[in-house]
Structure formats: structure tokens, C-alpha cells
Image (cartoon, rainbow, N blue to C red):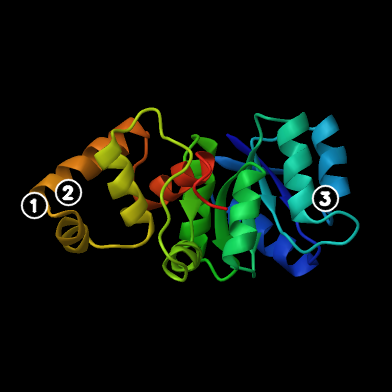
Amino acid sequence: MIRILIADDHRLVIDGIKLMLESVEDMLCVGEASNGKEALSILEKIPADVLLLDINMPEMDGLECSRLVKARFPKVKILVLSMLKEASLVKSMLRNGASGFLLKNAGKDEVMEAIRQVNEGKQAFSEEVLEAVMDSFSSKPAKPISNPFPKLSRREKQILQLIVEEKTTSEIAEELFISFGTVETHRRNILMKLNARNTAGLVKAAIDYGLLE
């Protein structure tokens, strides 16, 4: 059973999420909070596996709350549920320990699957959120990776940066003067070495290694 704490300052949102949770057998709402302070107080008394966290809240917002949750309750997985999708906010929440970021227009199935994914230690992003983050790369000139990736070869680092910049396999092959198949082989190796399942996982790995600033 996945124990879930909801932190949102809108009663309608909390009630809607609770209604969704009641329809699945493997999830249970163990608490609700209207701001970050209340969420921290509840976590001190009631264990939770996943914190569904809004960003804009009174008294303590989601940014500060996520930082404190990871410092005090490192085992709690944080899944952001917000109307905001600015790349800078997404990056900040991920740096503060969030495992996923969904928009509030997400459907029930997407939310339920995201909860299960972050509970298993994986990442989950709304498609629009992922696009916003990747657009933030393409809007500025490419720069070399200053913080080396210890597990990757020089060529793999180059390809990872180009993937994050939303280049297609064909574009990467053309830019690096290598074959399409070679790019695909490197991409599979990068996914394996960074323990990522998809492009979202590669973006998260890039953040963890300090590529996003």
C-alpha cells in the first residue's frame, strides 16, 4: 500500500485527489495539508511514502517544503502537482529532491502511474513539463559539459548533451559525423550507465550532474 500525503492550498484539489485515490486498491491518503509547514508537521507524526506537493502555497511554499522534506525525511518521494511549468521552477524542484513533476491538468491514469513510478524510485514528468525543460536548452547556445560524467566516455558525454538539447538521432549523427546506428548504440549505453529508462531520465541525470544551471 502506497501511503500518500497531499499538500495543496485548494480544498477542491485535495478532495479531487482523495476521490481518485479511493478508486485504487494500492494507495491510501494518510494526511492532507494546506501549506508546507503543515506537511512537515504531519510527516513528523504519520509516515508517508509519497508527498503530492503544490508549489504556490501560503506560509511555506513547495520549494522550501521540498528542501526540508528531503533533509528531514529522505525516504519520502516528492511528486509535484502544479499549474506552473516554467523550466526554472522544474529544475529547482528537482534539485530540491522532487522525483516527478505533473501539471494539474493531468488525468487520473497519469497521476496514478506517476505515483507508482516515484514510489519505485523512478522519475515521472508531464509531457508539457518535459518539453518546457528541453526548450530551455534549445533557447540558449550549447556549451561544453564542465562537470565530467565519471561513468561516460567523451563521445557519450557529447551525445548526452545533444540529446538533452532535443536533437534527433539523425541530427546527432550529422553533427558528430558518425552513423545513425552508432548514435543509437551510444544512446542505449548511456541509458544503461545512468540507469535511465527514457529521455526524462536522462534529463534528470543531467540535472544531478550539474549540467543544468
Q: Amino acid at mark 3?
A: Gly
Q: CA distance from mark 1 to mark 3?
A: 50 Å
Label 2, residues with CA under 10 Å away: few <14, some 14-19, many ≥20? many
Residue 92 in the figure: left or right of residue 125: right
Q: Is residue 31 visible?
A: no
Q: In this rendering, which labeled residue sits more in front, label 1 or label 3?
A: 1
- Residue occupying image coordinates x 24% and y 44%: 187
Mark closest to the chain's N terminus, 2 or 3: 3
Mark closest to the chain's N terminus, 1 or 3: 3
Q: Amino acid at mark 1?
A: Ser
- Asked if labels 2 and 1 touch by Cβ distance under 8 angstroms, the answer is yes
Residue with the mark numbered 3: 36
Q: Is residue 139 visible?
A: yes
> In the image, which disc is placed on residue 5?
none
> Looking at the figure, which quarter contains the N terminus?
top right
- Asked if labels 3 and 1 touch by Cβ distance under 8 angstroms, the answer is no
Residue with the mark numbered 1: 179
Q: Looking at the image, is 195 positioned above or below residue 112? A: above
Q: Name the element at disc 3.
A: helix
Measuring from the top left, give residue 159's x and y in whole percent. 28, 48
Q: CA distance from mark 1 to mark 2?
A: 7 Å
Residue with the mark numbered 2: 183
Q: Amino acid at mark 2?
A: Val
